[in-house]
Amino acid sequence: MKFLFTFCAFLIANGMSVVFGQQASEVSIHLKNGSMIYGRILETDQHYKIQTYDKSIWVFPKSDVDTVIAEKMINPNIGYKKRGFVHYTELGPLAMSNRASNGVTTSAFSFQTTNGYKFSQWIYTGLGIGADLYAVQTFVPVVLSLRGDFTDKGSKIPFYFLEGGYSLNATSNDVDSLRFSGGATFAAGIGLKILFNGNTGFTIAAGYRFQRSSVTQAGSERLEDFNRLSLRAGFSF
């Protein structure tokens, strides 16, 4: 849990700096003719000398400038999508010291792909399917995913996610008297999406993952709960 809190603090510090942490030299210059340009100020003597994202240099007499606003320089290659189809594919470990009934440490690896629709900055819903490979059991989760972004500006987009659904149990039954069944699954956490082209970007995320299953042996059924720290990395478009 200490690692989860540290990781969440890292995401917040790096992601929310997009909202609050502007560099003083990065501005938007609004000209009197109605034009606007984003860049980094190099000189402010008798004129404004500004360097744009593509390293071009522009010089404007102060008499042509209406206002100068401190604002992060925009990467022209990225484009935040506020509405429309969005896809996520993510994978990573499910870590915890939880043990199965036979004493085996059940470390796991998770893969998931989600397709859905983004209604606004704050609300995305989608249907996801994946595979959770534990040491002693294998699950195929089918979940409803809810996500949202904490900002719509910049190339680093912090987000939250909530997921819930049911996991089919795909564990092989080698013993006739032993049967494995699936159960409910739930996940929640935060992440950071780093845009690099249009709305396409890399994602990293951390959160909590719960999985319930049941084991029937000799006619007796018992429940097994898996509580995990979920770490994921992937891409989205």
Image (spheres, grey):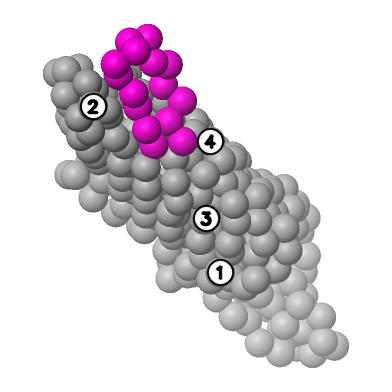
> Which amino acid type is marked by label 1?
Ile
Q: CA distance from mark 3 to mark 2?
A: 33 Å
Badge number at residue 144: 3
Q: Secondary structure at mark 2?
A: loop
Q: Secondary structure at mark 4?
A: strand
* Identity of the residue furthest to the top in this view: 174
> Which amino acid type is marked by label 3?
Leu
Tell me if mark 2 has few (under 14), some (14-19) or many (20+) residues whose alpha carbon lies within 10 angstroms of its own.
few
Dot 3 and dot 4 residues touching (CB under 8 Å):
no
Dot 2 and dot 4 residues touching (CB under 8 Å):
no
Badge number at residue 123: 1
Dot 4 and dot 1 residues touching (CB under 8 Å):
no
Q: Which is nearer the eye, 200 or 53?
A: 200
Is 20 situated left or right of 235 in this image? left
Report the residue marked by disc 2: 219
Determine the residue positioned at 20% across, 34% down: 222
Is 52 situated left or right of 95 in this image? right
Q: Visible in this render: residue 219?
A: yes
